[in-house]
C-alpha cells in the first residue's frame, strides 16, 4: 500500500473549492482530496459547517467526510467575504456545492459569475433533482428513496424502509466525481471548464434501474426484496447453535456439491431431485428445513469453518462497529487512523479502490474550523494587516480567534 515519497498523487495540482455540507457535497470533496487534490473546505463564519455539531447519526458526518481538506471560514454574506471567494474561484480548478437552489446566486457565486471569473473552472452543482419540474423541491436521501421505489424494495410488503446508511447522498457525491473527472479530461483538450450536475433523485433512479428492467419484462408488480421469489434455492439467514445468525448463499451446482462434500452428506449430494439449482428451488419446501437443522447444530466458528471449507458465499451478521476488529481490514490497512475534531482517535474507511503505486491514505485529519484561513489568505495576496482587519470585522474566522 506504500508509495515513494516523491510520487505525486493522481490529482496533485488540482485545487477544489468545497462548499459542500452534510454528506453529498463533502463525499465528493473527500474522494477528490484522497486522490491528491488540494481541497479547500469553505465554511460559513462564524459557526462553521453545521455538521460539526450534529448529534445522533449525524455525529459521524463531519469526521468521516472531511479528512485531507483545508478549512477557511468566511462570511459570504459580506462584500469582503465574497471578494475572498472570488479570488479563490480564480485560483481553482473545481468548485463543488450542494446548497439549495438559488443559494449560490445569493452568495454572489452564480454559475455565470464563476464562469466569467474563471473560464477553466469545472463547476459541480449537486442538488436534489436535475433541471426539470421537480428542480425547486427540497430533497433528502430518505425522500428520494421513497420517491424512486428503493424504500419499497428494501422493506417488507407495506413497510417501506430506507437503507441503513446515507446511500444516495454518497452515491450522488460519487457520480459528481465521475462527472468532474470527465470534465477535467475534456478541459485538457479544449482549455475550457464545464458545468457538472449530479442529483439525489436521478442517482437513486439509477440504483433501481435493474428493477425497472425487471418490471418491463413481467406482468405482475415487482415484489420487495424481503418478499421476492429467490432465483436460488439456498439464499437466506440461518440461526446457529449459539444464537448468532449467518447468511448463506448456495447459488451454483458446484457450490451445492462442495457444500454436501464438506458436510459428508452423500445422501444430499447424490439426490437426483436436488441435482440442479432449479430442481433445488422446486424442492425448497423439504430442503430448507434440512439446511436449517444442519446450521442449528453448529456454532459460529464451526459454521464459518464449514462454509470456508465448501467455498460458498456466507456472512455472519455484523454491526458496523464490528469492522474495527475485522481481520481483513486490519491486514490490508482498510481503516485509516484519524483524529476527530473533538480529539477522539479512531480508524475510518479508506477509499474502496486502489491505484498502483499510490497510497490513497490519510494526509491530514479533519480540520478545525478556519484552520487554514490565514495561510490561504496569504496565498491570495492578503497581508497581515488586511487579515487582522477581516478578522476584527467578523468576515473570517481563524485559529487566532
Image (spheres, rainbow, N blue to C red):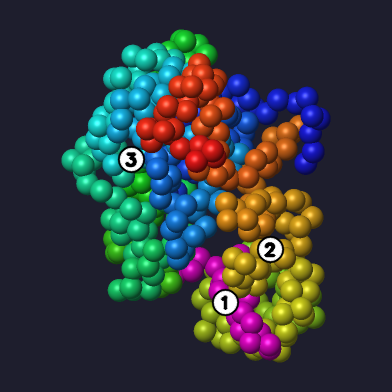
Judged left or right of residue 273, residue 262 is right
Residue drawn at x 68%, y 42% as measured from the top left? 362
Foreground mark, 3 or 2?
A: 3
| Whole-percent x, y for residue 339 in the image | 65, 52
Residue drawn at x 51%, y 76% as measured from the top left? 282
Q: Is residue 293 above or below residue 160?
A: below
Q: CA distance from mark 3 to mark 2?
A: 33 Å
Q: Which residues are magenta?
A: 229-251
Residue designated by label 2: 324
Question: Which picture quadrant has residue 307?
Answer: bottom right
Q: Quarter of the image containing the N terminus?
A: top right
Whether label 1 touches label 2, CB < 8 Å = no
User: Is residue 273 among the parts visible in the rendering?
Assistant: no
Residue drawn at x 76%, y 62% as measured from the top left? 327
Q: Could you say whether the residue bearing mark 2 is in a helix, strand or loop?
A: helix
Q: Please state which of residues 144 and 385 is positioned toward the viewer in this rendering.
A: 385
Q: Could you say whether the residue bearing mark 1 is in a helix, strand or loop?
A: strand
Residue 66: give its label.
none
Residue designated by label 1: 237
What crowding class fits label 3: few (fewer than 14 Cα within 10 Å), some (14-19), or many (20 or more)? some
| Whole-percent x, y for residue 165 in the image | 47, 59
Q: CA distance from mark 3 to mark 1?
A: 42 Å
Q: Please state which of residues 322 and 64 is positioned toward the viewer in this rendering.
A: 64
Residue at the top extreme, as displayed: 190
First in residue order: circle 1 vs circle 2: 1
Amino acid at each position: 500500500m506504500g508509495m515513494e515519497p516523491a510520487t505525486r498523487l493522481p490529482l496533485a495540482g488540482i485545487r477544489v473549492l468545497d462548499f459542500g455540507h452534510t454528506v453529498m457535497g463533502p463525499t465528493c470533496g473527500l474522494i477528490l482530496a484522497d486522490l491528491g487534490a488540494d481541497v479547500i473546505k469553505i465554511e460559513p463564519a462564524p459557526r462553521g459547517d453545521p455538521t460539526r455539531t450534529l448529534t445522533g447519526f449525524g455525529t459521524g458526518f463531519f469526521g468521516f467526510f472531511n479528512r485531507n481538506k483545508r478549512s477557511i471560514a468566511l462570511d459570504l454574506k459580506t462584500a469582503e467575504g465574497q471578494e475572498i471567494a472570488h479570488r479563490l474561484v480564480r485560483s481553482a480548478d473545481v468548485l463543488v456545492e450542494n446548497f439549495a437552489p438559488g443559494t449560490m446566486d445569493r452568495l454572489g457565486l452564480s454559475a455565470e459569475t464563476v464562469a466569467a471569473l474563471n473560464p477553466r473552472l469545472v463547476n459541480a452543482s449537486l442538488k436534489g433533482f436535475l433541471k426539470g419540474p421537480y428542480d425547486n423541491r427540497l430533497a433528502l436521501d430518505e425522500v428520494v428513496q421513497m420517491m424512486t421505489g428503493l424504500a419499497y424494495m428494501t422493506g417488507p410488503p407495506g413497510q417501506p424502509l430506507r437503507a441503513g446508511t446515507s446511500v444516495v447522498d454518497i452515491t450522488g457525491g460519487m457520480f459528481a466525481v465521475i462527472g468532474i473527472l470527465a470534465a477535467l479530461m475534456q478541459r485538457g483538450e479544449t482549455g475550457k471548464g464545464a458545468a457538472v450536475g449530479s442529483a439525489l433523485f436521478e442517482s437513486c433512479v439509477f440504483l433501481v434501474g435493474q428493477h425497472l428492467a425487471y418490471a418491463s419484462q413481467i406482468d405482475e408488480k415487482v415484489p420487495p426484496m424481503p418478499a421476492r421469489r429467490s432465483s436460488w434455492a439456498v439464499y437466506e439467514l440461518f440461526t446457529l447453535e449459539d444464537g448468532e445468525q449467518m447468511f448463506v448463499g448456495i447459488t451454483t451446482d458446484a457450490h451445492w456439491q462442495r457444500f454436501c462434500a464438506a458436510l459428508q452428506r452423500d445422501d444430499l449430494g447424490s439426490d437426483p431431485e436436488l441435482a440442479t439449482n432449479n430442481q433445488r428451488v422446486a424442492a425448497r419446501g423439504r430442503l430448507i428445513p434440512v439446511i436449517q437443522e444442519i446450521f442449528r447444530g453448529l456454532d459460529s466458528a464451526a459454521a464459518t469453518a464449514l462454509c470456508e471449507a465448501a467455498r460458498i458465499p456466507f456472512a455472519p451478521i455484523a454491526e458496523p462497529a464490528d469492522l474495527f476488529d475485522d481481520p481483513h481490514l486490519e491486514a490490508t490497512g482498510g481503516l485509516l487512523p484519524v483524529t476527530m475534531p473533538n480529539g477522539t482517535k479512531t480508524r475510518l474507511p479508506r477509499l474502496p479502490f486502489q491505484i498502483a503505486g499510490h497510497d490513497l491514505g490519510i494526509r491530514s485529519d479533519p480540520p478545525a474550523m478556519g484552520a487554514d484561513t490565514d495561510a490561504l489568505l496569504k496565498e491570495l495576496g492578503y497581508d497581515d494587516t488586511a487579515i487582522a482587519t477581516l478578522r476584527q470585522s467578523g468576515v473570517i474566522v481563524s485559529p487566532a480567534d
